[in-house]
Image: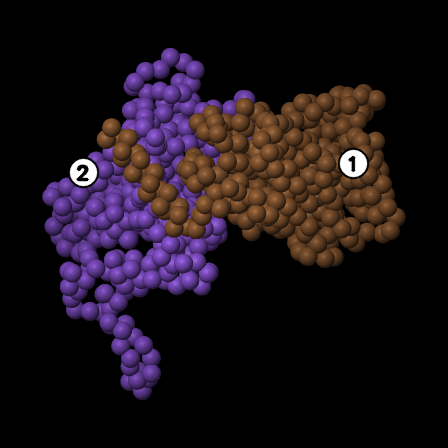
Chain colours: A brown, B purple
Amino acid sequence: MTLTRRHLLGTAGALAGAAALGTSAEAQQRLNVGVVLIGPVGDFGWSHMHDQGRRRMAEVLGDRVNATTVESVAPPDFDRVVTQLVRTGHRLIFTTSFSYFAPTQRLAPQHPQVFFENATGPTTLPNMAIYNARFYEGRYIQGVIAARKSRSKTIGYVATFPVPEVIHAINTVMRGAWSVDPSMRVRVVWVNAWSNPAREADAARALIDQGCDVLCSHTDGPAPLQLAEQRGIFGFGQASDMTRFAPRAHLTSSVNNWGDYYAERARAVIDGTWRPTDTWGGLGSGMFRMAPWTNMTPEEVSEAERIRDAIASGRLHPFDGPITRQDGTVVIPQGGRLTDDQIRAMNYFYQGIDATIPS
Amino acid sequence: MRLILEKRAETPLAMTIASPLIAVALTLVSAAVIFLAMGQDPWAALHVYFVAPLSDSWGLQEVAVKATPLVLISVGLALCYRSNNWNIGAEGQFLVGAMAGGWLALATHGAPQGPWLLPSMLVVGAIGGALFALIPAVLKTRFGANEILTSLMLVYVAELLLDWLVRGPWRDPQGFNMPVTVTFEPEAVVPLLLEGGRLNLGTPIALLVVAIVAVLVGRTLKGFEIRLVGEAPRAARFAGFDERRLTWTVFAISGALAGLAGILEAAGTVRMLQPGISPGYGFTAIIVAFLGRLNPVGCLIAGVFLAITFIGGENAQIMLRMPLDVTRVFQGLLLFYVLACDTLLLYRPRLVRSAAA
């Protein structure tokens, strides 16, 4: 009895706190959506674009949602942030990193009335969906453009971690470059961070010194592209349109667009049609797009657009054979195609990539 | 005309205690001004920030969970700083403690375990932290190497070691190549104490440590030695105290406490090893130690206060939709005011005519 009363008093206290924050009765009708970010909103990359997605969702759904961002949430703080979001009435929570997959999986069953969505996680639960974008499609286009632009026939890739997501991205750059010129090569430097401008710049410097004259980057910020600008070579932006960081070096960027997906999922919760789906959207779904082509000739632009449209419509598939591994063995013969599961588990490099996967 | 700082002959005890409180009060006033400038009702915002985290059992437990590593580390650092040993590397000792204790959890993963496992992990974690802290201590006493530099640089060594371990030998085979270990078995996880919250055994351990260190400093010869070496090194030498052994002792204690905090965090809140296991606890604890006047009980109070500002910062993001940077600004302001108050406590500002120079 005492315990119950104390519990009730505690709840009343929390409610009083909430009331003081201006959560009026009318606002209670809205769906509260929480977005948990691994990095700062201002990284101009991954976390920034998820926050942009939250803004877009709020624009689309107007006064039907309240959206909250919590940034730079470290692993020890994740449980508390999610619990606090649940306690303050958030019913749809996006946890936007693979690092959050295991803890989201642990917390979701404790809050069965809340819908969770984990970005880039591998499996679903009854109240936990997963979502990701087929960024490799943009990598293929980057490979084609790089092969047209490069004089040294060597592309540099500032890579983050040797996870399948990054490995298959490097491979598709190689695949795209092959399609133009089979003698192209890709060099890789592992930064071992998603965001570390100093190390990203060091990696870019090392790649340029090794003769790379087009830079791809998998890290969150514009540092590698800025270095490409300084050294007078070309590069691609990552996650957001990075033209302004390198007006003379920027070729194109893969621009993430989570907003439409977030709006669709929030609407599903409001309408009661939410299901624990597994979404892997590509160029065709609008989950990302290619930013304005810059510093490219009209012929290069029309080729890039032709390939983009072919991929978006499904006529061209970046994982069509023949695909040869680094050691010379053929993984997919002519006419074959890798399955989604094979792509997600990719653990080897294609021929032409001058790097090894750290074991 | 220029401004000079003159050392005060004496500082009243009341002011020594009041100084951190004045600093906190000034921080709160500045916070209110910032909230006002951001278009928030300052009272409501201060409520969300500093009161809401304490308004129910769940919130209090979370404050305790967040404060525990800060208190444990800062109590050890306070001993170092009192005796003029500048251990800046608690972050590294924290990580080595987590790795040492975590090693035991991983080595026994999947094998039959018993109630001995967790206590052994805590002991191994503390020993790991202590040994790692002894490196800068020995470098200092043997070669006269500056311990500020060596202890700080060893932080990066520890970070990279953890990075390598979770990417290489300790990586979870089912982890999709992500840099994480397996989730610890239930026997290797610090037990929770209350329903409906995350309070775990780490908090009572931290309180016990505060009590023991308070007695050590206040009531024992060792405590006297630590204070004397810090305040009057020459007198301490005449008294026959061995400065080198003292350096080893305080580094070992503070390393052990940081290591203990590390394994408690790994086995308590995160339940696995991964990079980013510490959001800078080892560095934040330096602020805590100074805010707590290098006194164990003071560190406890300061640790709780800083934990509230962290959680309040999250609350402000969730309830007021304010950016995280506001929290960082607060913590910066707090440290600034503490240092400013201390300086004015020890020194008297005076205007002098330039002709006098």
Instruction: Determine which of the numbered discs, if any, sits on residue A312 in the image.
Output: 1
A54 lies above or below B99: below
* Residue B128 higher or lower than B351, as above or below: above
Q: Say whether residue B130 is left or right of residue A111.
A: left
Q: Residue at x 16, y 69 (%)?
A: B9
Three-letter code for the amino acid on which mark 2 is drawn: Ile
Q: Which chain hosts label 2?
A: B
Q: Amino acid at mark 1?
A: Ala
Residue A189, position as x, y percentages in the image? 63, 40
Toward the right, the furthest residue is A299
Chain letter behind tag 1:
A
Residue for point 30% across, 34% down: A7
Taking depth in this image into account, of A152 and B220 the one nearest to the observer is B220
At mark 1, the secondary structure is: helix
Q: Quadrant of the N terminus of chain A?
A: top left
Q: Is residue A96 above or below residue A108?
A: below
Residue B208, quarter of the rendered image = top left
Quadrant occupied by the C terminus of chain A: top right
Q: Nearer the viewer, residue A186 or B304?
A: B304
Mark 2, residue position:
B212
Question: What residue is rendered at 85% in x and 52% in y?
Answer: A297
